[in-house]
Image: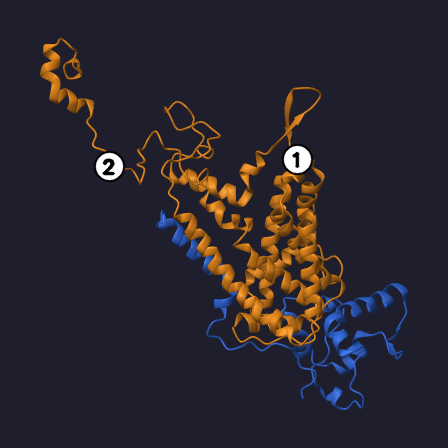
C-alpha cells in the first residue's frame, strides 16, 4: 500500500516536471520560483525542528553503555563505548556520525530449527547505509562545480578522485554507481524481508524512491541524453548569485532532476530525513555516562523542604538519647 | 531552550556550510561564462554550420569526437556522414580546427568552468591561435 502510493507520487512528480519543462509558463516556476521557495522552507524548517527538539530537557543522562564504565583505576574503562568525559563523547559522536558505529553492531535474529533464537552476522545494512551517505556527500560536493566560478580546489580534487577510473565518456563517477547500488539495496530489503516490509511506511519508501529518481535522472542526463552543461552552469551560477536567468535549450530531463531535488528538500524538514540534524542530538550517544560521578538535578524539580536525618538528630538528639536510641553522630 | 551553547553554534556552522555556494561569490560580479565562436575562418564561410546541429554539438560533442576517434583508430574509416547526409572528413585537426582556431576561447573557457579536462591534447597538437 505505502509502496504503491510512494511509487505513484514519485512517477507523477516526474511526469509533472517533464510536462512542465516544455511549457514556457512553467519553466520559470520550475527553475527559479520553486528552488528559492525550497531553499527558504528547507533552512527555516530545519532550524525550527532543531529548536523544537532543544525545548525538550534531558534531565537524566541516558547514554547506552556498551563497555566498561569508568571505575577503579585498575579496571580498564572503555572510553568510547562508555565515555566519562567530553573527549570520549566527541570520539563517540565522530565515530557515530562518520562511520555509523551503532549500526555496525546490528545483528540478525532468527528462529532457526526450533525454539532457539540465534543471532547472526548482518553488516549489509551498515555497509549500504555508509556507502549511500558518503556517496551522496561526494555527489553534493561535485555539484558545486555548477554553482561556483572559479571552482574551489576541494571540489576539483573530489571530482577528479570520483572519476579516476576514466571509464567511458563522459567519465563514470564511482559514487554514481555506488549510490544507485546502495539505495537499491536499501529499498529492496524493505520489500524482500517480510518483517521489514511489515514495519515499512510510505515515509520509508518515498525518500528512497525520490533519491533513486534523482539518481536516475542525473545519470540519464550525464551519460545518456546529455544536456548543454554550459547552459546548466550559467543557470546555476545565476541562481546562486540571486540574479536568476531561466535556462534555455536544456532538455526536460534537467527539469525532472531539478524538480525531484526540490521536492526532496522541501519534504526534508517534515520527515525522517531530519536524522541529519537529529543524530547530533541523540541523548543515548551525546552524553557522558557520569550519572554516578556527578549529580544532575532535574531542571523542573519543585523545591521540596527536606528535613535530612542529620537535621532530625540535631532536633531530637536529646530525646533519642534519653530513650536509649543509638545516634549516628556519636558512632563516628 | 536547553543546551543552547552547543546547539546554536552547531546550527550556525551547519548554515554557513550549507549556504556555501550562496555566499562564496557574494559581492563579486557575475563570472564570464560561455564561449566564443567567431574566428576569421568562420567569418569567411558562406554557410556557418558545424558538423551537426548546434544544440547537438553543445550537449554531445564529446561523444561525437569519441566516436570519430574509434572510427579512425579502430576501423580506419575517415568519412563521417552527418544527420543531414553531408559528408565530412573525420579529422580533429583538419575538420574541427579548420574553423575553430580559437582553442582558448572556444574549448578551454567552458571546460575549465566545468572542471572538464579532455585528453585531446595528449595526442593532438593544439590549433594555431589566430586573432580576430
Name the colour assigned to chain B in the rendering: blue
Q: Is residue A176 left or right of residue A331?
A: right
Q: Position of residue B18 (x, y in %)?
A: 50, 59
Name the colour assigned to chain A in the rendering: orange
Q: Is residue A291 left or right of residue A117?
A: left
Q: Position of residue A239 (x, y in %)?
A: 56, 71
Subunit bearing disc 2: A
What residue is pinned by disc 1?
A195
Residue A105 vertical placement versus A150 (above, below): above
Looking at the rendered structure, which numbered label has been put on residue A303? 2
Residue at position x 58%, y 63% in the image: A144
> Of callouts 2 and 1, which one flags the residue occurring earlier in the amino acid sequence?
1
CA neighbours of label 2 inside 10 A, class few (<14), some (14 to 19), many (20+): few
Q: Is residue A60 visible?
A: yes
Q: Is residue A94 left or right of residue B99?
A: left
Q: Position of residue A201 (x, y in %)?
A: 62, 45
Q: Position of residue B89 (x, y in %)?
A: 86, 77
Residue at position x 41%, y 39% in the image: A287
Subunit bearing disc 1: A
The quarter of the image holding the C terminus of chain A is top left
Q: Is residue A180 visible?
A: no
**Which residue is situated farthest in the front direction here?**
A1
Amino acid at each position: 500500500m505505502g509502496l504503491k502510493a510512494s511509487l505513484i507520487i514519485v512517477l507523477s512528480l516526474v511526469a509533472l516536471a517533464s510536462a512542465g519543462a516544455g511549457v514556457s509558463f512553467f519553466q520559470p516556476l520550475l527553475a527559479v520560483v520553486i528552488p528559492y521557495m525550497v531553499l527558504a522552507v528547507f533552512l527555516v524548517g530545519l532550524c525550527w525542528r532543531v529548536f523544537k527538539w532543544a525545548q525538550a530537557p534531558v534531565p537524566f543522562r541516558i547514554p547506552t553503555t556498551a563497555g566498561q564504565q569508568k571505575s577503579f583505576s585498575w579496571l580498564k574503562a572503555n572510553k568510547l563505548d562508555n565515555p566519562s568525559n567530553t573527549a570520549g563523547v566527541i570520539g563517540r559522536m565522530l565515530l557515530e556520525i562518520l562511520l555509523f558505529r551503532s549500526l555496525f553492531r546490528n545483528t540478525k535474529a532468527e528462529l532457526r530449527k526450533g525454539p532457539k533464537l540465534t543471532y547472526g552476522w548482518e553488516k549489509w545494512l551498515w555497509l549500504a547505509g555508509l556507502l549511500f551517505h558518503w556517496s551522496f556527500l561526494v555527489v553534493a560536493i561535485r555539484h558545486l562545480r555548477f554553482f561556483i566560478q572559479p571552482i574551489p580546489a576541494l571540489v576539483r580534487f573530489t571530482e577528479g578522485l570520483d572519476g579516476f577510473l576514466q571509464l567511458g565518456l563522459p567519465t563514470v563517477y564511482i559514487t554514481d554507481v555506488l549510490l544507485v547500488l546502495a539505495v537499491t539495496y536499501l529499498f529492496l530489503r524493505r520489500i524482500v524481508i517480510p518483517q521489514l516490509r511489515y514495519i515499512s511506511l510510505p515515509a520509508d519508501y518515498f525518500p528512497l524512491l525520490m533519491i533513486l529518481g534523482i539518481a536516475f535522472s542525473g545519470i540519464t542526463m550525464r551519460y545518456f541524453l546529455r544536456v548543454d552543461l554550459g547552459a546548466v552552469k550559467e543557470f546555476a551560477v545565476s541562481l546562486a548569485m540571486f540574479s536568476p536567468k531561466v535556462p534555455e535549450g536544456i532538455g526536460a530531463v534537467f527539469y525532472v532532476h531539478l524538480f525531484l531535488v526540490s521536492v526532496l528538500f522541501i519534504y526534508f524538514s517534515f520527515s525522517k530525513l531530519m536524522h541529519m540534524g537529529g543524530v547530533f542530538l541523540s541523548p543515548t550517544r551525546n552524553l557522558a555516562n557520569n550519572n554516578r560521578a556527578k549529580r544532575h538535578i532535574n531542571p523542573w524539580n519543585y523545591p521540596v523542604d527536606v528535613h535530612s536525618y542529620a537535621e532530625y538528630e540535631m532536633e531530637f538528639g536529646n530525646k533519642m538519647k534519653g530513650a536509649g536510641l543509638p545516634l549516628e553522630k556519636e558512632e563516628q | 531552550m536547553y543546551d543552547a551553547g552547543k546547539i546554536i553554534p552547531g546550527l550556525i556552522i551547519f548554515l554557513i556550510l550549507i549556504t556555501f555556494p550562496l555566499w562564496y561569490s557574494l559581492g563579486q560580479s557575475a563570472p564570464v561564462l560561455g564561449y566564443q565562436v567567431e574566428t576569421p575562418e568562420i567569418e569567411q564561410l558562406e554557410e556557418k554550420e558545424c558538423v551537426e546541429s548546434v544544440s547537438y554539438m553543445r550537449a554531445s560533442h564529446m561523444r561525437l569526437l569519441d566516436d570519430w576517434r574509434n572510427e579512425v583508430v579502430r576501423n580506419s574509416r575517415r568519412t563521417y556522414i552527418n544527420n543531414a547526409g553531408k559528408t565530412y572528413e573525420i579529422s580533429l585537426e583538419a575538420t574541427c580546427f579548420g574553423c575553430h582556431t580559437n582553442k582558448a576561447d572556444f574549448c578551454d573557457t567552458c571546460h575549465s568552468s566545468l572542471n572538464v579536462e579532455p585528453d585531446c591534447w595528449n595526442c593532438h597538437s593544439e590549433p594555431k591561435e589566430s586573432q580576430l
